[in-house]
Structures are given as C-alpha cells and as structure tokens.
Image (cartoon, rainbow, N blue to C red):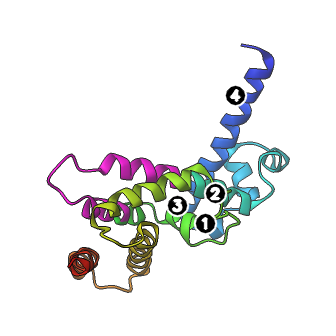
Amino acid sequence: MSIQNRRERERAERHQLIIDAARELAEAEGWDAVTTRRLADKVEYSQPVLYSHFKGKDAIVRAVAIDGCGELARLLRKARPSRGESRLRVAAEAYLRFARERPALYDAMFVQQSDIPWGTGEVPQELLDAFGELVAAVEPVRGERDLEALTEVFWSSLHGIATLVQGKRLRPELDETRLDLLLGALSLAQHEERP
C-alpha cells in the first residue's frame, strides 16, 4: 500500500470516527452537548484536526444525517417482507422503530437545521436511497395517484407521528390504532379512485 493510500485511508477513518463520536455524544446527552471541543477530547485529536475534516458543528450534524439516511435505507430494505405482509405496514413500523430507537440520529436527519439540498438534483445518494425505499413501499397502493407526492404524504405522516411520540405528545396505547388509520386511509383512497 502506498503512503498516499494509507494517508487517505487514515483520513477516512478519522472522518468516520468524528461522525460516530458526535452521534454517540448526541444520543447520550443531546445535540447541545456536541461541541468541537468535546468531540476533540472524545476522539483524542486536536480541534484543528476536527476543523480539517469539518467546518464546524453544522457540517458534523450534516454528515451524521447523511450517514443516518444510509442506515435508514438499509434498514427499510432489510425489512421488506418476503410475502404476505403489507409492504406499507412493514416500512411504517421499521421507520417508526428507527425514530424511536435512535432519537438523536433521527433529530439530526429530519429536525436539526441543515444545508442538505433536499428535493434537488444535488441530494446525496443516501437520502435518495431512503426515499426510494419509502417509494417502493407506497407503490402497491398508488392507484392513479402521483407516486412521489403520495410517498411524501406517507413520509410526512410518519415523521409527524415519530416527532410527536418522541415529544411524548401522543398516547402510547394508541400507537397501533394511529398506524392502522394512516395505512387504511392510504389504501382506502386507492380503492375509492377505481370505477
């Protein structure tokens, strides 16, 4: 292995170490606790080394969010049912479980301010992959409706549920009922469109 290749590999490993440390710190103490000083201490590198990888905390949160979208895409892909189960239900349950089990990561992905270019041609592949998995789940109930718009409604509904559950604003005993209503509404609307 050439010296250049080794340096590039070490740089990539440091980059990922910083992302992982930020995520761990945020999961343990919240995003307010994530500072470049605390991260430098946690990864045992100087702050200038952190700044050689990221311009600041916002860039670190952005990197965590992009990583998280890749993780969500893989989780949704893995959760695809082989047969029998509703693909829409399985995706919804996996999405909500992801949000519940990784609250700080979910917050970085969909709540924190970010310069990620959502809805543009410059969107990172990880985001496209995650959205693509939601599109694939919605496609069977599409009917004559616009697939991407319907997927955005599905995603928005899941995000609302996830955010309100995380904020303890919904009654836990109605989790299944809420999901049944959402999935029923998406499926019912498909059947109502048919002549």
Disc 1 to disc 3, how far (Cα)?
20 Å
Within-10-Å neighbours for mark 1: few <14, some 14–19, many 20+: few
Residue with the mark numbered 4: 9
Within-10-Å neighbours for mark 2: few <14, some 14–19, many 20+: few
Q: Which mark is residue 194?
A: none
Does the magenta run of residues contain 188?
A: no
Residue with the mark numbered 3: 105
Amino acid type for the residue under numbered disc 2? Val
Quadrant housing residue 93 = bottom left
Residue with the mark numbered 1: 119
Q: Which mark is residue 123?
A: 2
Amino acid type for the residue under numbered disc 4? Arg
The residue stretch that appears in magenta = 69-95
Residue in the image at 47% along x and 66% along y: 103
In the picture, the quarter occupied by the C terminus is bottom left
Amino acid type for the residue under numbered disc 1? Gly
Can residue 68 be seen?
A: no
x and y percentages locating residue 82 in the rendered image: 21, 46
Within-10-Å neighbours for mark 4: few <14, some 14–19, many 20+: few
